[in-house]
Amino acid sequence: MNIRIHRIYDADMPKGYHVLVDRLWPRGISKDEARLNAHWKDLAPGNDLRKWFDHDPDKWGDFRKKYLSELSAHKKEAKEHLKEAGQKNIILLYGAKDKKHNHAHILKEYLEKLI
């Protein structure tokens, strides 16, 4: 199993088990277009944390710590999601414009430690 990150709006969607990891549905993408296998909104940052961060790179370090703390409370759910994906390559899909400072990177790191 391999975990990759891909922006849902970008072309050249990699093959694998496609999972939306945003709490909110991405604007302008229909459910048919998304072709998702799952939507793991329970592993996305909580609304308060998401609003506080607001994709501000200056808050990245603190956001990372707070989000990892949130994820630790959802370890059971994370393991269940990984089990559902089986041995397929997992593609974590996100909608943020900033490809460097988004929660999908942190989630990927967290999930890889659970494998």
Image (tube, rainbow, N blue to C red):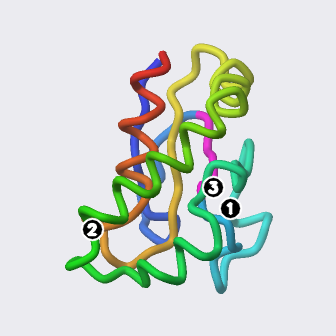
Task: Give the residue type at disc 3.
Answer: Leu
Q: Nearer the viewer, residue 56 or 25?
A: 56
Q: Residue 44 carries which label?
A: none
Q: As displayed, is residue 110 above or below residue 97? A: above
Query: In the current view of this chain or complex, which residue is farthest to the left?
Result: 58
* Magenta residue check for 73: no
Chief secondary structure of the magenta span?
A: strand
Q: Distance between the residues labelled 1 and 2?
A: 28 Å
Task: Give the residue type at disc 2.
Answer: Trp
The span picked out in magenta is 17-21
Q: What element carries label 1?
A: helix
Please identify, in this view, whether the residue under mark 3 or under mark 1 is nearer the observer. 3
Task: Please give the name of the residue rendered at 67% of the width and 25% of the height, measured from the top-left corner.
Answer: 85
Q: How far apart are marks 3 and 2 (CA)?
A: 21 Å
Q: Dot 3: within a 10 Å radius of its alpha carbon, few (fewer than 14), some, or many (20 or more) residues? A: many
> x and y percent of residue 86 in the render?
66, 16
Query: In the current view of this chain or complex, which residue is farthest to the right?
Result: 31
Q: As displayed, is residue 67 above or below residue 59? A: above
Task: Please give the name of the residue rendered at 44% of the width and 63% of the height, measured from the top-left corner.
Answer: 7
Q: Which of 103 and 97 is in front in this view?
A: 103
Q: Which residue bears the numbered disc 2?
A: 60
Q: Which residue bears the numbered disc 3?
A: 20
Task: Please report contact status of discs 3 and 1: CB closer than 8 Å, yes or no.
Answer: yes
Task: Please give the name of the residue rendered at 73% of the width and 24% of the height, measured from the top-left corner.
Answer: 80
Mark closest to the chain's N terminus, 3 or 1: 3
Q: Residue 34 carries which label?
A: 1
